[in-house]
């Protein structure tokens, strides 16, 4: 496999995670970065010892010798940038959400088909270790048919987007939720199927005047199956909990701490409950020991790390893109509809106060 030359567009916070991930892939080399803030692009290039920096994607294209463009800019710019890159002959990786509108997402899909470029969207929670383990358990049939999925994604008020009055997310229908709801939507699509939004409730608890809402509870469904997403920006700590309820067992995942609890059928006796408690404690201990070993020996991987490694491997040979732009489009459709419902709910609440 020959070395793949990568250019990263956008040098904000998320780019650092991407740069770390690319550095772990021996077959790739980041040769350039760009940002409209050229000083930021320069400092990023110096920090990561990247040979070239530019102030635009157009300048990057002129450099030549690039195989792949990694787009880390705000999502409202993703369509124009990814289309420009694909039309210039590059493959593209796009940070989530793929776009903020279905119309823009459709443009990316059409361009990918027209150009034949390899293009993927980073749905990174799908590639975090607990979710990969849950996938393995499901494929072995231990969980049985999944009936319901519950996701809690809670953050403190210090969340970097929520706390920034001037962040771009606050200008979109759905506000801060418009950026992050892609995560629970793509998780539900993965485990439940083609979910549709059924109901959204929002409220305001925190004190940021630029946030119309900072608490959300949304229900999704496919057929007679349900999914629920609870999102808060008022929590005492950051946490991501995922519960999968199957006919044969329950799975409880904690994404940030990378733990998995498998809860099989049990009898209602006291003895059975006691053994069940011991089993759960043993599983958490095992997860903690494994995680500590990964950190000590430098084998800890984030969802971004795993996705980017898989995408790099898909560049050559017949391996599938980890998450296609077609799947990205489906997530955007549900995200956009959810944000429209949030916007209507916020307007109703404003009119009644």
Image (cartoon, helix red, strand yellow):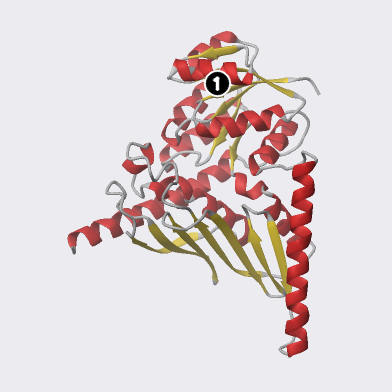
Q: Is residue 210 left or right of residue 305?
A: left
Q: Which residue is mark 1?
A: 44
Give the crowd class for mark 1: few <14, some 14-19, many >=20 residues within 10 Å: many
Total labels: the figure holds: 1
Is 226 on the left-hand or right-hand side of 323? left
Residue at screen point 63% across, 66% down? 244
Q: Quadrant of the C terminus?
A: bottom left
Query: Can residue 207 be spotted in the picture?
Result: yes
Q: Residue at x 52, y 61 (%)?
A: 152
- The picture places residue 63, in percent across and down from the top left corner, at 58, 9
> Which one is in front, 290 or 3?
290
Where is residue 51? Give x, y as percent: 62, 12
In the displayed structure, does residue 103 sit left or right of residue 50? left
Q: Can you name the residue that lies furthest to the bottom here?
A: 269
The image shows residue 91 at horizontal and vertical percentages of 62, 26
Q: Is residue 143 visible?
A: no
For residue 322, what is the image quadrant? top right
Which residue is located at x 74 percent, y 79 percent? 265
- Quadrant of the snapshot with the N terminus: top right
**Residue 151 drawn above or below residue 122:** below
* Nearest the eye: 186 or 201: 201
Is 311 left or right of 210, judged from the image as shown?
right
Residue 100 locus on image (x, y percent): 42, 41
Q: Secondary structure at mark 1?
A: helix
The correct choice, above or below, for 267 with respect to 52 in the image is: below
Residue 326: name its quadrant. Answer: top right
């Amino acid at each position: 496999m020959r070395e793949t030359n990568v250019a990263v567009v956008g040098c904000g916070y998320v780019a650092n995670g991407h740069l770390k991930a690319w550095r772990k892939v021996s077959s790739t080399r980041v040769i350039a970065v760009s940002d409209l803030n050229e000083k930021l692009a320069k400092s990023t290039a110096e920090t990561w010892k990247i040979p070239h920096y530019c102030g635009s994607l157009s300048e990057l294209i002129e450099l030549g010798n690039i195989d792949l463009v990694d787009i880390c800019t705000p999502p409202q710019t993703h369509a124009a940038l990814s289309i420009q890159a694909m039309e210039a002959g590059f493959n593209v990786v796009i940070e989530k959400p793929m776009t903020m509108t279905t119309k823009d997402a459709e443009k990316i899909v059409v361009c990918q088909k027209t150009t034949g470029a390899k293009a993927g969207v980073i749905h990174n929670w799908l590639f975090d270790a607990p979710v990969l383990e849950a996938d393995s358990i499901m494929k072995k049939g231990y969980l049985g048919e999944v009936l319901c999925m519950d996701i809690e994604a809670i953050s403190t008020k210090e969340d970097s987007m929520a706390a920034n009055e001037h962040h771009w997310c606050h200008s979109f229908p759905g506000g801060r939720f418009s950026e992050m709801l892609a995560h629970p939507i793509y998780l539900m699509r993965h485990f439940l199927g083609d979910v549709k939004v059924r109901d959204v409730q929002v409220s305001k608890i925190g004190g940021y005047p630029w946030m119309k809402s900072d608490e959300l509870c949304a229900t999704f469904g496919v057929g007679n199956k349900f999914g629920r997403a609870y999102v808060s920006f008022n929590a005492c700590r950051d946490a991501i909990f995922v519960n999968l309820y199957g006919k044969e067992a329950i799975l409880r995942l904690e994404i940030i701490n990378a733990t998995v609890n498998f809860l099989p059928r049990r009898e209602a006796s006291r003895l059975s409950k006691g053994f069940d408690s011991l089993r759960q404690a043993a599983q958490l201990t095992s997860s903690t020991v494994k995680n500590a070993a990964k950190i000590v020996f430098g084998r800890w991987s984030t969802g971004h790390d795993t996705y980017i490694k898989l995408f790099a491997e898909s560049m050559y040979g017949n391996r599938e893109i980890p998450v296609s732009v077609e799947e990205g489009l489906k997530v955007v459709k549900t995200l956009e509809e959810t944000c429209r419902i949030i916007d209507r709910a916020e307007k109703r609440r404003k009119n009644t106060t």
